[in-house]
Image (cartoon, rainbow, N blue to C red):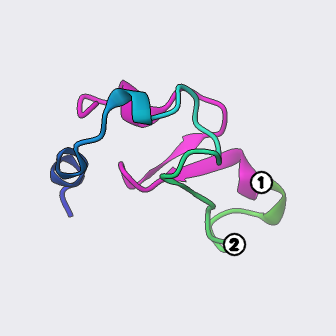
Amino acid sequence: MNSKKEFSAKKLEMADLPKYCDFTCPHASFAPNDAVGACRREMAVYCTLLAKYNNKNARCAARESKFG
């Protein structure tokens, strides 16, 4: 899976992405239960655009990446 091709294929505008990473983003997903403990499950946000985790309330990883 080539995340660069997927990201460019979606042709998102920077204005469509939030400034900070949280669960209000349409591209955010919860971590699976087996990935982390239940008490830490909501501390990381899975970005479906970049196919990786980002810390909740950190700057948007897609905006910071070279793809954005």
Q: Secondary structure at mark 1?
A: helix
Near-viewer residue (56 or 37): 56
Q: Please tell me which residue is depicted at 15% across the width and 51% down the height of the picture.
A: 5
Where residue 29 appears, as percent x and y from the top left, is 57, 59
Q: Please tell me which residue is depicted at 77% across the width and 54% down the height of the picture.
A: 40
Q: Which amino acid, mark 2?
A: Asn
Q: Is residue 35 above or below residue 64?
A: below
Where residue 43 appears, as percent x and y from the top left, is 72, 46
Badge 2 local density, few (<14 within 10 Å), some, or many (20+)? few
Where residue 30 appears, as percent x and y from the top left, is 63, 61
Near-viewer residue (39 or 11): 11
Q: Secondary structure at mark 2?
A: loop
Badge 1 local density, few (<14 within 10 Å), some, or many (20+)? few
Q: Which mark is residue 40?
A: 1
Q: Which mark is residue 20?
A: none
Q: Quadrant of the C terminus?
A: top left
Residue projecting furthest to the right? 39
Queried whether the magenta region covers residue 57, the answer comes back as yes
User: Magenta region: which residues?
Assistant: 40-68
Q: Which amino acid, mark 1?
A: Arg
Q: Please tell me which residue is depicted at 52% across the width and 51% down the height of the picture.
A: 26
Q: Which mark is residue 33?
A: 2
